[in-house]
Amino acid sequence: MSKKYQEEYEVAFSPRLVMEEASRCLLCLDAPCSASCPAGTDPAKFIRSLRFKNVKGAAETVRINNILGAICARVCPTERYCQAGCSRSGIDKPIDIGRIQRYITDFEDALKMDILEVKEDNGKKIAVIGSGPAGLTVAAELAKEGFKVTIYEKEAKAGGYLRYGIPEYRLPNAIVDREIDRIVKLGVDIVLNTKVGEDIKVEDLRKDNDAVIFAVGYSQGKMLDMFKDNRKVIKAVDWLKKTKIRKGNVKVPENVLVIGGGDVAMDVVTSLKLLGCPHVTDVVYEQFSEFRASKKELMNAQEQGVTIIDGYVPVATGRGGIVKFKHRILPAELKIKADLIILAVGQVADVDGLGLTLEKGEVNVRGVRIPDTNMFFAGDIAHGEKTVVWGVRSGKEVAFEVKRFLGGKK
Amino acid sequence: MVRKDLSITFMGVKFPNPFCLSSSPVGNCYDMCAKAYREGWGGVVFKTIGPKHYLIDEVSPRFDALTKEAEPFVGFKNMEQIAEHPLEENLADLRRLKKEFPNQVLIASIMGSNEEDWEELARLVTEAGADMIELNFSCPQMTSHAMGSDVGSNPELCRKYCQAVRRGTKLPFMAKMTPNITDMCDPAVASIEGGANGISAINTIKSIINVDLDKKVGLPIVDGKSSISGYSGKAVKPVALRFIQQMRMNPKLKDVELSGIGGIETWEDAAEFILLGCKNLQVTTGIMQYGYRIVEDMKNGLEHYMDEQGVDRLEDLVGLANKNIIPAEELDRDYIVYPEINKDKCVGCGRCVISCYDGAHQAMEWDKDSRRPNCNHDKCVGCLLCGLVCPVGAIKPGERVLKAGRKEKNLKKMVLQDTMEKL
């Protein structure tokens, strides 16, 4: 079946199929899946609810734990977390937990369930900078606790990398919208087109709020020196953003070279294929055995016919889109000429005007609060993995710390 | 987040929720019952306590399961009898459970072999602090014919033993019925006349569920032999529901309080028993397979159901389905509901065609080229077997047509077959 950029790549479970999948679950004692989600998800409980026909209860379990449950269901590299220790692997293969969670959150949306409750206003105000996974989560968690939360977002719409990065076939913006609507319904205000540090000062936010939380994320793509000012080169995050905003209506050349082997690179190469690019070549620094991309995304890329060359590092560029590579270990060289070169070699945070000092991309402070201030930080710039589920984890952790710091009612 | 009050009063005692362990291996000692209470069960029927003189000596192995295709546990066979612990130990467990879990209901199940036993056991469990008593008239695998289902199929013994129990206690008590009988109403009426306050049903069905083809013996095999014994689990639910309905329809039993037992695993099963008139529910096989934890989803699911139905008291759902189950001769036989085939949903397996030809009326025709079925209305009788076998739910009840020469009597909106709707 031919896949399209604007349609979800993975087919949703039907009610029968989700029950078949839930029936594969062994309903283990001390279930490994429930001990391995960074965001604290309890798959053993929601799969059991589903199995015993309590889909609404399953939706409550997912949603109360994770305000971005429908997003995580789609984008989480579950093979590294909940599915890694699945006892069913002793028989054949792990339960498809992500897809089950997607069924449950789709069900929740279809029935317009209203699961979350908000505690009485405690009179305290919080400012959150950034509306990516960590920012949304910390805002929602604090709103549920009765804080008045305002998110400041520099872009025209909220969602950060969820909206502007992860391609439509993997995470439709309609899903991002629904999750954000739910957060707004909890009482969170989102101020758009406002860059803190430029349009509004951090000092003013600190004065007007009881706490300020930096959740700015890694929004900028990295550039390699040899590609600077090369007109054939675009950074992956920029290309993904443009493509998602235009709903896939972008010009795709005949022959594209992508450099990088993480999930962002996989998003780029698979998007290119789904948009009809005939020749997509991905050259990756790591060898297959050490690949960073999730297995599922790598599989999708391969299924779409992307040429993946592993173990090569770019060493020089030539005119007209030529890049020369050398193998990291073997005495081998490679020369590729492409119409477009997309760099997916990592991202960094944009902390201009925020007064933050980063060390190796993270705030160089122990814990989640900048000492002797009411400023906290969450998400990519905090210590931990740079994934959506870690953003959720970090958002929950910071919400807990903010609540502890500010105490109860004013 | 749904929050509904599941509490319900049964035989004068308020239960925090209607879910109870039934008298069986799952409530065999203090530790088990305490764990069940902690996991949220509304009540416990402690495993049947027998007289001091009756010694329990169990076989090994003692269980077996009926499977179908990939389902590991359609039905379950059990050869265990009543509590094997000494009487004093059981009474001590009852005392401790009531002391530590005063807000959850403690039901003592008892079984005697004569009137003296019954009266004495009733007195003892009352003194131990039970909130109510269940009389086990129904275990089908006792090693004494003076006990168990041989009693439950004899209305006079039921009456006599109820009278004996009434002499021994002031507590409310229910008589647990055996399904190994044509009409359960007879022993149930006799029990009520003898003083019982309620009826619980059903106990297990006498069964042989598997035969070992090499050894030529039923399962489980005990030293080369096997016995008939009780069958339970999901497979017996239809039988249980039928007995419950029949008792609710009996003029002498229609207001008697019922505790439903038989294949309850999900909130949907529970709701079915409630809609057919049960105020209390008991579970064993589901727990043996999955653990006490199944109560979480039964409770939460039932709360959601109450929310959907717009009721705040569980009691308001009790018996709502009874009036809609009527004698076969009273059903409207004037129309046919033809199947409606969703050709896009259809995956072209042809199972409907096979079943219609071999099991129905040869109405489903097969287009070999498109691999799609088509219903010939000249032959179709509207049995809808096709919809039941379709693996993708592509066949639903469709157009409803009056049979030739019949008049529309009933203009009420037709209720589509629920089982088909769920597909």
Image: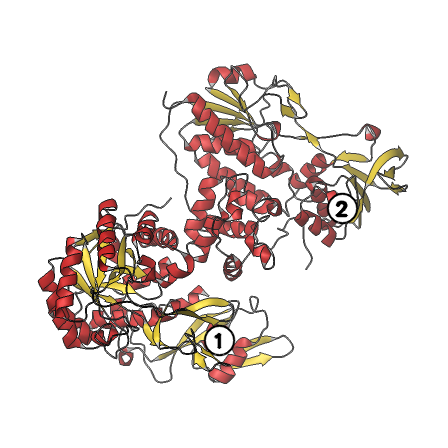
**In the image, is residue B141 above or below residue B105?**
below
Residue B307, image x and y in percent?
33, 51
Task: Report in which chain the residue with disc 2 lies.
Answer: A
Task: State the count of labels.
Answer: 2
Mark 1, Cα crowd under 10 Å, few <14 / some 14-19 / many 20+, is: many
According to the picture, the residue beneath numbered tag 1 turns out to be B386
The disc placed on residue A401 is none
Q: Amino acid at mark 1?
A: Cys
According to the picture, the residue beneath numbered tag 2 turns out to be A288
The residue closer to the viewer here, A376 or B329, is A376
* Dots 2, 1 in contact, CB < 8 A: no
- Asked if labels 2 and 1 share a chain, the reply is no
Compared across the picture, whether A6 is left or right of B156 comes to right
Compared across the picture, whether A155 is left or right of A65 comes to right
Residue A201 location, quadrant = top right
Residue drawn at point x = 54 percent, y = 79 percent: B353
Residue B137, image x and y in percent?
22, 70
